[in-house]
Image (cartoon, helix red, strand yellow):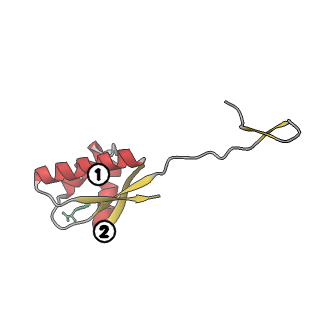
Amino acid sequence: MGRPRTQHQSGTAVAEKTRTEYPKQYKVILLNDDYTTMEFVVYVMETVFMKTPAEAIQIMLQVHKSGRGVAGVFSKQIAEAKIDRVHAEAQREGFPLKCVMEEE
Ligand code: TYC
């Protein structure tokens, strides 16, 4: 490891500063609707997004009142997997609950 070194004409190796690259992060955003029960949204917050009961209620109410809310921030792969899980569980219960992802 260590810094990359550039060979100059003189033959002297000069250490360069590296730029640290981070993987992109994505917000998973929960959307409001008129049919999904509050209880199911709280259940999803607790089981898919690992929120405490108090956090789960707070996020659910925020979505209910304002139309949307952030369930969490994840790498692309994890965000996609969580969204798939929410949609699968909602469909199984017959609820139209939807979430989307947005690059942070
Ligand atoms: N608005 C729903 C109701 O009154 C509750 C709800 C909250 C639905 C959050 C979806 O993402 C949601 N039953």
* Residue pictured at 23% horizontal, 54% vertical: 41
Residue with the mark numbered 1? 83
**Residue 63 point in image, percent of width and height:** 31, 63
Question: In the picture provided, is 96 more to the left or to the right than 26?
Answer: left
Q: Residue furthest front?
A: 9
54 or 46, nearer to the observer: 46
- Residue 10 on image: x %, y %: 89, 39
Q: Number of numbered discs present? A: 2
Say left or right for 39 vs 17.
left
Give the CA distance from mark 2 to mark 1: 17 Å
Instruction: Indicate the amino acid at tag 1.
Output: Ile
Residue 98 drawn above or below residue 48: below
- Residue occupied by mark 2: 67
Q: Looking at the image, is mark 2 or mark 1 nearer the viewer? A: 1
In the rendered view, tell whether residue 34 sits above or below residue 56: below
Quadrant of the frame with the N terminus: top right
Between 9 and 77, the residue placed more toward the observer is 9
Q: Is residue 54 left or right of residue 74?
A: left
Q: Image point 83% across, 41% down: which residue? A: 8
